[in-house]
Amino acid sequence: MICCGEEMHELIANTTEAALEKHLPAVTMNEGKIEVVVGSVEHPMTDAHYIEWILLETDKGVQIRHLTPADAPKAVFEIGEGKPLAVYEYCNLHGLWKTEL
């Protein structure tokens, strides 16, 4: 499959922590909200190395929060009626990471 003149590659989410920086989304569910912090040790957010986005997958769809290097590596999502299934985050250097709920 081609997009924008480039061959596309499937992203496979990492689920096991192997890097020095922590990438697995840490999730807290509280009163209809899900709070996500990237890493048990907060992930760095610099121009060269940062979390681009955090995504919540539910049985009703997805919600995404886009981040910049000036943001903290965290997001809050309203759960609503959907059943939470997984949280993903994308690091510009280390790729896609997933925590199943």
Image: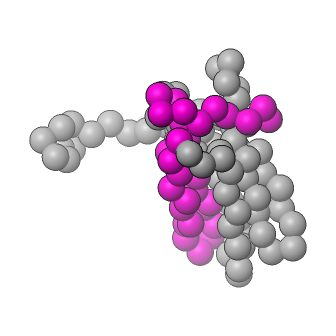
Q: How many marks overall?
A: 0
The picture places residue 85, in percent across and down from the top left corner, at: 68, 59
Q: Is residue 101 magenta?
A: no
Residue found at the very far front of the displayed protein: 70
The picture places residue 42, in percent across and down from the top left corner, at: 73, 36
The picture places residue 79, in percent across and down from the top left corner, at: 71, 73
Towards the viewer: 2 or 55: 55
Q: Quadrant of residue 40?
A: top right
Q: Give the side of residue 51 with respect to residue 38, left or right.
A: left
Asked if residue 100 shows in the view, the reply is no
Q: Which residues are magenta?
A: 40-69
The picture places residue 77, in percent across and down from the top left corner, at: 68, 67
Asked if residue 77 shows in the view, the reply is yes
Q: Residue at left 55%, top 59%?
A: 65
Q: Give the side of residue 52 with respect to residue 35, left or right.
A: left
Above or below — where is 68 with respect to 9? below
Residue found at the very far left of the displayed protein: 5
Towards the viewer: 63 or 92: 92
Above or below — where is 52 with respect to 86? above
Q: Give the side of residue 3 with respect to residue 41, left or right.
A: left
Identify the image quadrant of the N terminus: top left
Q: Quadrant of residue 44?
A: top right
Q: Residue at left 80%, top 74%?
A: 32
Q: Residue at left 54%, top 61%?
A: 64
Q: Residue at left 70%, top 73%?
A: 78
